[in-house]
Amino acid sequence: MTLAFSTIASLRFGTGFRPGETPPGSVEDLLAQLEAGRREALAFPDGGPAAARERLADAAQAFAGLRLAEKNRDPVSKRAHRLRFRAGLNNLLFKDEHARFMQGVLSPHGFNERLAGFWFDHFSVHTLKEGFTRLLVPLYEAEAIRPNMAGRFADLVKAAVLHPAMLIYLDQVKSFGPTSSAGLKRQAGLNENLGRELLELHTLGAGGGYSQEDVRNAAFVLTGMTVDRKTYRPRYSLGMAETGAWSVLGKSYGGARRGQGDILAMIEDLAAAPQTRAHICTKIARHFLSDRPPADVVAAMETAWKRHDGELAAVYGAMLRHRQSWENEGQKAKPPFDFIISGLRALSAEKDDLQDRGLAPLKTAMAMPAAAKDTRGAMTEAPLPAVDMPDAAIRKLRLNPLTVLGAARLGQPLWRPPSPAGFDDSFSTWIAGGPLTGRIAWARLAVAKLGDEHDPRRFLRETLGDAARQDTIDIVSKAPNRQLGLALVLASPEFNRR
């Protein structure tokens, strides 16, 4: 280890230094964040999960009433009512998006926050799949991902894959057993999206030894899982399920009688497969350490997985306790979300700095564009106008340019991955001419808004610890003014790597 423990712990395994906050001093400090983070009251969704669930039920009821009222309206009036309803959902989403950034900036549990981002990306869903996913996706992270990311991997898979946000995103709600009563009545058939991604992305990994027949049979086993559109909770519908026994990787599920237990058993078996263990341990190490993580570290993580029955806390501990995990710093690039979070933490951003700036009137908020297919075939709506509208229109929406709007401009809009595979995590994706130019512009804006009381040389020490190289120290020391000196720290190679 060439740098101080606290430096690597904060930069490689955390969300960066925050002045006045004590950095982790040991591996045990990092691991203790898992339980502390689980007990922490989240800044999102607005008002907490119970309040968000209540809003979701109210919105579902309001939408049912809207559809009933539309029966006697002309097409123009129907469209206007739909747009107002959609704009209301957008406004709720904007609040939760700003609160999610607040969570990352203000939480002292950086390792826990990094894991939340990693696992959300691994089990990617998209806020714009349909209207109600705007309310479901913040809940998905809060109630499916975060409570389960330090427990058994199998339990995390069940919570994520069977959550309504995932069932809708990967079109499981449109999957019917071809000979089921509901399938015959609707003349609808099987949708393989969730079955495919469960094997390829969530568990075994590409090249994990499964066949197209395994994908199709997994999709058959999953039939019956759907979403209650009144409560937006998962439910099992026997009328949608395909009867019979289906073999996945040589194991049979189902038979004359089908039930949700078949799905849970399949997930347990997939989670326990050696291919899954190798895939997930490598991916975790790749996220934290290097695009080509040390084989010895991955092997230690796999051993811990086997010994502790897939307990993820033990897997993280094996990574953190391995000597090679603390060597060769700067091998990974910060994606835009992490760059913004660490920049705002360095600048001591507070709650008021992270709020939305007052949302637009509903009529400004928007006629939504048509749906489109993403690169893996899942249907998503086109991005919100908040990302693609001209600057003048964006300013009317008053999204915070340091958080929600900033991440979108840098290429990583919150909760909107480009595909079910999530955002690319490789070094080259985020360190190139275009992205760096955008980061410099963000740094200058952040410093202009939040940098009044910071001295550049002290800011450099507080932000990078002993990771600052001599050439960076010299450049910052010679900056012609304070604001440029602060921006140079945020734009430095050391700050953009971990």
Image (cartoon, grey):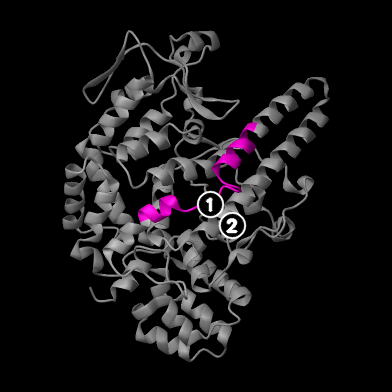
| Residue at horizontal 70 percent and vertical 57 percent from the top | 394
Residue 48 within the segment the image draws in magenta:
yes
- Mark 2: give few (<14), some (14-19) or many (20+) Cα within 10 Å: many
* 54 vs 66: above or below: below
* 258 vs 231: above or below: above
Tell me the kind of residue under disc 1.
Leu
Is residue 425 in sight in this rendering?
no
How far across and how far down the image is residue 70, in percent? Answer: 78, 24
Pick the front one: 82 or 150: 150
Residue 88 within the segment the image draws in magenta:
no
Mark 2 in CB contact with mark 1 (< 8 angstroms)? yes
The quadrant in which residue 493 appears is bottom left
| Residue at horizontal 19 percent and vertical 61 percent from the top | 322
Pick the front one: 37 or 392: 37
As drawn, the label of residue 414 is: 1
Is residue 309 in sight in this rendering?
yes
| Residue at horizontal 34 percent and vertical 77 percent from the top | 467
Q: Quickly name the residue at label 2.
A: 404
Give the quadrant of the C terminus. Answer: bottom left
How far across and how far down the image is residue 74, in percent? Answer: 83, 25
Q: Is residue 2 left or right of residue 79?
A: left
- Mark 1: give few (<14), some (14-19) or many (20+) Cα within 10 Å: many
* 410 vs 44: above or below: below
How far across and how far down the image is residue 146, in percent? Answer: 43, 47
Q: Is residue 13 left or right of residue 448?
A: left
Magenta stretch: give its range: 34-57
How far across and how far down the image is residue 218, in percent? Answer: 34, 24
As drawn, the label of residue 397 is: none
Q: Is the stretch drawn in magenta largely helix, strand or loop?
A: helix
